[in-house]
Amino acid sequence: MIRKRIIAGMAVGLLSGGLFVYTTHEKSEAQETYNAYVKETYNEQPDIELSRDWKMGGYVGKVTLTNEPFAGTYFLETYGDGSIHNNVLETYWKREAERTIHERLRVVRNLERGRDGPCGSTDRSVG
């Protein structure tokens, strides 16, 4: 009876040890893949934080880019077909649209206040 418990304990230990080694190896492969992707695509060597993606069955990376115009924090995700997707361009275009809208609103407000010149002159008495 004790012998069976010892054998069962060894089997569970080997299984859990193998699983630990496998997940550690899988995580390091994901880290290397994401590092290479960011270096090739955005010419940066950032630190990437990985977390387990239980929905897709792999890892999701969180990366912070420092070079303009893409400076910011983004995610990286590997799909089932092996392709890597991120939200860099989506976030960039969203920020660009917000910046453009704010700039246009500022121009409209200045026009409504009577500052229709490029210098923002409000002097209407001349002329």
Image (tube, grey):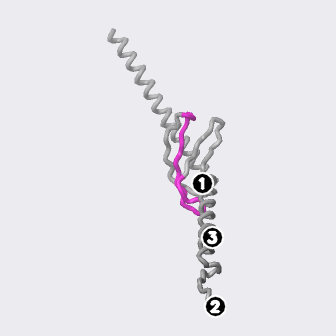
Q: Which residues are magenta?
A: 55-73
Under circle 3, the secondary element is: helix
Which quadrant holds the C terminus? bottom right
Residue at 59% from the left image edge and 76% from the top image edge: 113
The image shows residue 53 at horizontal and vertical percentages of 53, 37
Which residue shows up at 40% across the image and 24% down it? 13
Q: Dividing the picture into quarters, in which one does residue 109 lie?
A: bottom right
Q: Residues within 10 Å of mark 1 (few under 14, many from 20)?
A: some
Where disc 1 sits, the SS reads: helix
Q: Earlier in the sequence, mark 3 or mark 1?
A: 1
- How far apart marks 3 and 2 lie (CA) works out to 23 Å
Residue picked out by circle 3: 108
- Judging by the rendered image, the residue that carries numbered circle 2 is 126
Residue 60 colored in magenta in the image: yes
Question: Nearer the observer, disc 3 or disc 2?
Answer: 2
Residues at marks 3 and 1, CA–CA distance in whole angstroms: 26 Å
Circle nearer the N terminus (2, 1): 1
Residue linked to disc 1: 91
Residue placed most toward the observer, 54 or 113: 113
Tag nearer the camera, 3 or 1: 3
Q: In which quadrant of the rendered view does residue 10 lie?
A: top left
Check residue 71 for magenta coloring: yes
Q: Amino acid at mark 3?
A: Val
